[in-house]
Amino acid sequence: MSTKEIVWTNIELECSSRKRRTLFFDCRCDAVSSSEQTLDSERPLLIAFHGGSGQSEQMEKLTGFMNLARQKNFFVAYPEGVNRHWNDGRDLPKRREIDDVEFLDKLIDHLRQSFPIDAKRVYACGISNGGFFAQYFAAHVPGVLAAVASVAATVHEPMYKGVKPAEPVPILFVVGKDDPVVPFSGGQIELASRKAGFVVSAEDSFKYWASANHAELQFVETELLVLQADDPSRVLKRTYPAGESGKPVVACIVEGGGHAWPMGWQFYRERYIGKTSQQLDTSREIVEFFFQNQRG
C-alpha cells in the first residue's frame, strides 16, 4: 500500500510562539488493525524525526512506518523541525534559539491526552540531524522514552564532551561504515561542502552510550544474512548487553553503506551521501528493537 492510500492527520501545536506541524497516523482508523483491538486500548507511539532539510512526508516515504503501524497496531508521529532542522545540541546558526526539547515534550503530552497511548511504550528515532536529536532528547528528558534509534548519526562532540544522559535508555544505531557525511571514524560533518560540526568515532559513540546505560563494554557481534545477492554491502550487528539495572546498546554497522536509511530510497545523490544498502530492513529492525523494550 502506498503512502497516498493511508489516511493521516496534520496536527498543529504552538510552542515558543511558533506553530509546528506533525503528521500523525492513527492506526485505530485502519481496518487491518482495528479488528484486533478495541478502539480505547492503549498502543505504542513511534516518533520519527526527519533529517536536515527534510519534511514529515519525506520521512514517511523513507521509512514506511505507517504500513508497519497498520500491521502491528502502533501510532506514528512525524514532527517537522523549524526551517526543516532540529536543534540537536550542536551550536549552529539559526538553531540556537529553537527549543526542540520543549516542543517534543509538549507534543508527547498533547498526543497522550488526545489518543490512547501506552506511556510505557513511547519511542523515538531519526536519521542524521533527526538521529542526533533523538539521542539529545533522550539524554535530557528522563522518564519519557522507552527506547531510541539513531540512523546515520553517531554522537556529536558537544554531546560527547558535555552531556551525561539523565538515565539509561535502550538505543539502536544504524550507521554506514562508508558514510561521507557523518564519518564512521569521527571528524567533520559535511554535506556538499556545507560543514556542520564534528562527531566522535562510531566506536566511541557506542561506548559512550554503553557507559551511560551501564551496559557491558565487551560486545557480541554477528554478520546478518545477505538479503540481496547483487548488493556488495554487508551488515554486522553488534550488541552491548545490558548489565544489572542497565539497558542494551545495539549497533547495525553497514559495511559499504553510506549516509542512508538502508532499504529506503536514495534521497540524495550518491556522490554526496554514498550508497543505500539493501541488506537491512531498517524500519522493521527498529520496530522490533523498540517492541523488545518498554519502561518498567
Image (tube, rainbow, N blue to C red):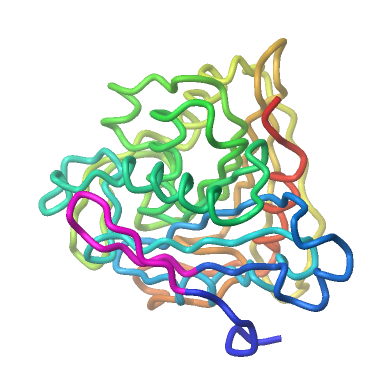
Residue 151 is situated, as x and y percent measured from the top left of the image, at: 51, 52
Between 113 and 52, the one nearer to me in the picture:
113
Residue at (44%, 23%) from the top-left corner?
A: 165
| Residue at the spot 23% in from the left edge and 41% down from the top edge | 90
Looking at the image, which residue sits at the far top? 244
Which residue extends farthest left? 93
* Count of marks overlaid on the render: 0
Which quadrant of the view contains residue 168? top right
Q: Position of residue 14 (x, y in %)?
A: 28, 57
**Residue sitting nearer the eye, 225 or 63:** 63
The quarter of the displayed image where residue 293 is located? top right
Viewer-nearest residue: 74 or 180: 74
| Residue 17 within the magenta-colored segment of the rendering | yes
Q: Is residue 233 above or below residue 35?
A: above
Q: Is 137 situated above or below 233?
A: above
Observer-nearest residue: 151 or 32?
32
Q: Which residue is drawn at 60% across and 64% down?
A: 262
Question: Which quarter of the image is occupied by the N terminus?
Answer: bottom right
Q: Is the magenta stretch mostly helix, strand or loop?
A: strand
Q: In this view, does 265 lie to the left or right of 20?
A: right
Left or right: where does residue 182 sit relative to residue 82? Answer: right
Query: Residue drawn 66% across and 52% down?
Result: 116
Q: In this view, does 270 lie to the left or right of 24?
A: left
Region in magenta: 10-23
Q: Is residue 33 magenta?
A: no
Quadrant in the rendering for residue 94: bottom left
132 to the left or right of 230:
left
